[in-house]
Image (spheres, helix red, strand yellow):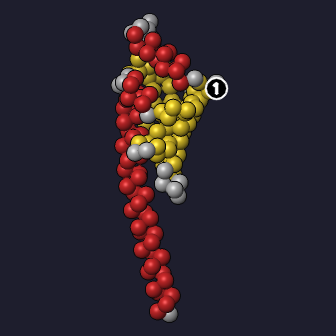
Amino acid sequence: MKKILTGFVIALLSMSALADHHGAHNADLRAAIVAFDHAYATNDVETYFGFYADDATAYFGDGRVNLAEYREMWTGLMASGGGVELNEMSDLQLQVMASGDVAIATSFIDNRTRLPDGTVSTSKAFETDVWQKIGDNWKIVSLHYSDISPQ
């Protein structure tokens, strides 16, 4: 019985150490996610695009977008008087892979964007981001943004 209890205690301690290890990764990851969302909400192009890995894929609306073209479109939107007015994330869920260097973040997004002519576009969406720790930084390697149809 003593051997069983000792084995059980060792297993619990191992799981606790593993949870602490992932907790530290989660703090870094959560900070990156919040900074990414804030950069988008405040039209900070450099910071926002700095979170994407060089070879990242992104899907908005009808399909895959070229990140260089997306950046150019967004910069043009702001230069002509448009931009993001609101981008609020809710119900953030994280799944960190056992390796600790890859994670999936899912959330809901409430967005309001001002177009150059002054009209405002609002949307609600689901967002799924695949993050990877590259060097010392969390980067998005894939992002999928899907509008939620009004009911």
On screen, residue 26 versus residue 151, left or right, reads left
Instruction: Identify the residue shown where x is 44% and y is 34%.
Output: 51
On screen, residue 144 versus residue 51, left or right, reads right
Residue 93 visible in the shown view = no
Instruction: Identify the residue shown where x is 55% and y is 32%.
Output: 55
* Residue 26 versus residue 47 in the image, above or below: below
For disc 1, the marked residue is 63
The mark total stands at: 1
Residue 133 visible in the shown view = yes
* Residue 15 versus residue 74 in the image, above or below: below
Name which residue type carries label 1.
Answer: Gly
Quadrant in which residue 10 is drawn: bottom left
Instruction: Identify the residue shown where x is 45% and y is 75%.
Output: 12
How many neighbours does mark 1 have within 10 angstroms: few (below 14), some (14-19), or many (20 or more)?
few
Quadrant in which residue 23 is drawn: bottom left
- Front position in the image: 50 or 113: 50
> x, y (%) of residue 113?
44, 19
Instruction: Identify the residue shown where x is 44% and y is 6%.
Output: 117
> x, y (%) of residue 76?
45, 12
- Front position in the image: 21 or 35: 21
- Front position in the image: 92 or 12: 12
Which element type, helix, strand or loop, lies under badge 1? strand
* Residue 113 versus residue 137 in the image, above or below: above
- Front position in the image: 149 or 106: 106
Q: Quadrant of the C terminus?
A: top right
> x, y (%) of residue 58?
57, 30
